[in-house]
Image (cartoon, rainbow, N blue to C red):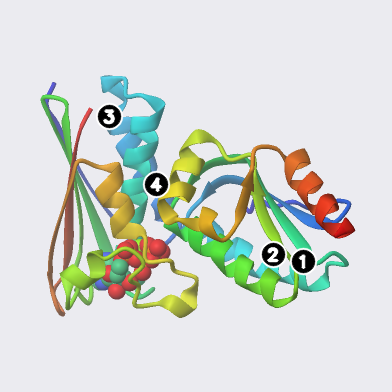
Amino acid sequence: MMSKNFYLGKNSLIVNLRGEIDQYAAAQLKSNIDIEIENSPKKNLIFDLKEVTLMDSSGIGLIVGRYKLVTSLGGKMMLCNASESVFKMLRLSGIQKVVDIYETLADAEKSLSKQKGR
Amino acid sequence: MNNYLKAEFSSKSINESLARIIVSGFIMSLDPTIEELSDVKTAVSEAVTNSIIHGYEGKEGKVMLELTLEDRELTVKVCDHGIGILDIEQAREPLYTSKPECDRSGMGFTVMESFMDSLHIVSEQGQGTTVIMTKKL
Ligand SMILES: Nc1ncnc2c1ncn2[C@@H]1O[C@H](COP(=O)(O)OP(=O)(O)OP(=O)(O)O)[C@@H](O)[C@H]1O
Ligand SMILES: [Mg+2]
């Protein structure tokens, strides 16, 4: 089963990832997410990880790949709602050095609306 | 309690979740913490994925998963008869990947190493790769 969900926030495209993000899931999600990014009226992307139950390095690869696409199109990318185990994986990968990680979706959205004023 | 299990499956990505289910079922009787369970599942996922995408490069093959439990020490063996690894030291380096163009981050062995207590890799070019990991539960 493919688990994906997209919707538009105030300043961003929000991608709801679900379930176990391994190579199988990442391969299926990748092209769908890229199509949404390319067609999105908003440049920024927020990955909401609330419903992610497991993420391995294929999930990190998925996120880093989308980060490259989003930034090449002039947008910002952020992550939110990571569970303890998902956060452990994110931290180990060092991804927090390039991608901002927020506790809640509201926090991530707030940071974008602040930047807009600048 | 001592226990043993051996499973063999096709080198298809859909079997990554099967491998995780097998290992979590195998250690369930030890009542592992949520973190231990997630660490072991993730490490198995990494090893099996490597066999599928690097060992067999997406082609048909068999991946073997062997689990041993001895006095609360879990040993996981993941084995393939794929292309093998030329330079194991380089492969173990964080961020090293031979497939940077495929959204790979080169973190698999680093994950196995840090989520488990030990990681041992045996590989021969053209023969295949065996990854052996242990973790005290
Ligand atoms: N079973 C295997 N057979 C052949 N080569 C392998 C095998 N496992 C790993 N390798 C080699 O070792 C390298 C490093 O593996 P590692 O899992 O650390 O990173 P990756 O798989 O490239 O990226 P990631 O795991 O982050 O998606 C791989 O790029 C590959 O060249
Ligand atoms: Mg890997």
Which mark is in front, 3 or 2? 2
- The secondary structure type at the circle numbered 3 is helix
Callout 3–callout 2 Cβ contact below 8 Å:
no
- Tell me, yes or no, whether dots 4 and 1 are on the same chain: no
Ligand 1 closer than 8 Å to label 1 CB: no
Q: Is residue A113 toward the left or the right of residue B70 in the image?
A: right
Kindly indicate the quadrant of the structure image that contains residue A34: bottom right
Mark seen at residue A33:
2
What is the chain letter for disc 1? A
- The secondary structure type at the circle numbered 1 is helix
- Regarding residue B89, the answer to whether it shows in the image is yes
Callout 1–callout 2 Cβ contact below 8 Å:
yes
Q: Amino acid at mark 3?
A: Ile
Ligand 1 closer than 8 Å to label 4 CB: no
Callout 4–callout 3 Cβ contact below 8 Å:
no
Residue at figure coordinates x 24%, y 64% from the top left: B92
Q: Amino acid at mark 2?
A: Ile
Q: Which residue is mark 1?
A: A36
Q: Which residue is mark 3?
A: B27
* Residue A84: x %, y % from top left: 50, 34
What is the chain letter for disc 4? B
Please tell me in which quarter of the rendered image ligand 2 is found. Answer: bottom left
Kindly indicate the quadrant of the structure image that contains residue A30: bottom right
* Residue B71: x %, y % from top left: 11, 24
